[in-house]
Amino acid sequence: MEIAVVGGGIAGLALALALQQRGIACRVYEAAKQVRELGVGITLLPHGMRELTAIGLQEKLRAVAIENQESVFFNRHGQRIYGEPRGRYAGYEYPELGIHRGKLHRVLLDAAIERLGADRVVMDRQCLGVEQDEAGVTARFRDAPPARADIAIACDGVNSTVRRQFYPDERVAFTGINTWRGVTRRKPILTGRSYIRIGTIETGKIVIYPIVDHIDGTGNQLINWTTEIRMPGEPMNDWNKPGRAEDFLPVYERWRFDWLDVPELIRGADTIFEYPMVDKDPVARWTFGRVTFMGDAAHPMYPRGSQGAAQALIDARTLADELAKGGDARAALQAYEKARLEATAKIVRTNREHPPDYIIMKVDELTGGKPFAHIDDVISQDELRALSDQYKRIAGFSLRQ
């Protein structure tokens, strides 16, 4: 059996490695002409690291990442609301890592080239669509010959060309939340291993965590940050335009705490990108004969709670396991869809309605957004822990699960 993997991002490369591990042939077709270490940070949660460990990449990733020790929540006044240990510090078997997205992609790509062979990871192949018949599927590319395979897996992201064939009228869902992301070189914040959330989308929110240690030999880290702001009446951010601090910095200008100067963090950024906060409504099916979707092409979700990458990695292992059972490949695609479609749809809905920073939203609701004298006068730590545990259960990575 020969499998065409359309897209060489996290989902596509993880699938290729999982298939190779099970003795199944595939070829990855990536639109980019070359891979460069671009972008900002990403968090690899324990259930994502479980999948990456299974394909033999944990140690290589830990060597270029930072292991998170704690997650902490603050209101926009800089007051600590709640904190909890993360990853192995919380008793999980696998670590939670903060890593530069480009470095994660590089580790996956290098492993795929080493294990599959360089001819099995084909660059500069922008997919225009797929066609299928009883015998197989043909992927067509811009300025390149078509490729024939038994099945095709669309791993080509939120704006998937392949998915658009089957859902031509579909649009991303934008509800007025825009985001800006950047990386800044500076001294460690709090423990230097802290995943920090401050504020809410209603008044401005920022998520901060380190992704590279000792970036310049002076004790600085590379700090990843992401802002989210609800902006009624404003147009959707443009994925292809570099971000400008002046477009969002006024929201955070007064966020100066004794433990962090947020405006200084933003102004010191090496680079800033802007993105819209979008997802897509869950669909009734991913699989159409010899074609199915995976990762962001299957279940685009809000980039909250670091779930996008984790769910793509679980997709990859699930589909590889189904194909490894042998038999009709089309039946394996159906079994994969049955295992993953509703599970991921639940996370898409959860990230819209009950994000992990619901803890901060709840405290703002109880305090009217004002500073508090002591958090225990507002809500107990047990109640806050229950809110955190609820999200983990729904998202599929509670410690018990």
Image (cartoon, rainbow, N blue to C red):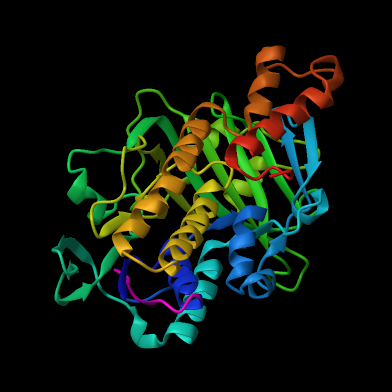
| Percent x, y of residue 343 | 49, 41
The quadrant of the rendering that contains the C terminus is top right
- Whether 137 is among the magenta residues is no
| Percent x, y of residue 256 | 71, 36
For the point 48% across and 64% down, the residue is: 321
Res 269 visible: no
| Percent x, y of residue 50 | 64, 60
Closer to the camera in the image, 271 or 291: 291
For the point 17% across and 62% down, the residue is: 128
| Percent x, y of residue 123 | 31, 77
In the displayed structure, 277 sits above or below 200; it is below
- Whether 27 is among the magenta residues is yes
In the displayed structure, 309 sits above or below 197; it is below
For the point 77% across and 30% down, the residue is: 385
Q: Quadrant of residue 7?
A: bottom left
For the point 61% across and 73% down, the residue is: 57
The quadrant of the rendering that contains the N terminus is bottom left
Closer to the camera in the image, 211 or 220: 211
Residue bounds of the magenta highlight: 22-32
In the displayed structure, 54 sits above or below 174; it is below
Left/right placement of residue 378 relative to residue 231 reads: right
Closer to the camera in the image, 384 or 238: 384
Q: Quadrant of residue 212?
A: bottom right
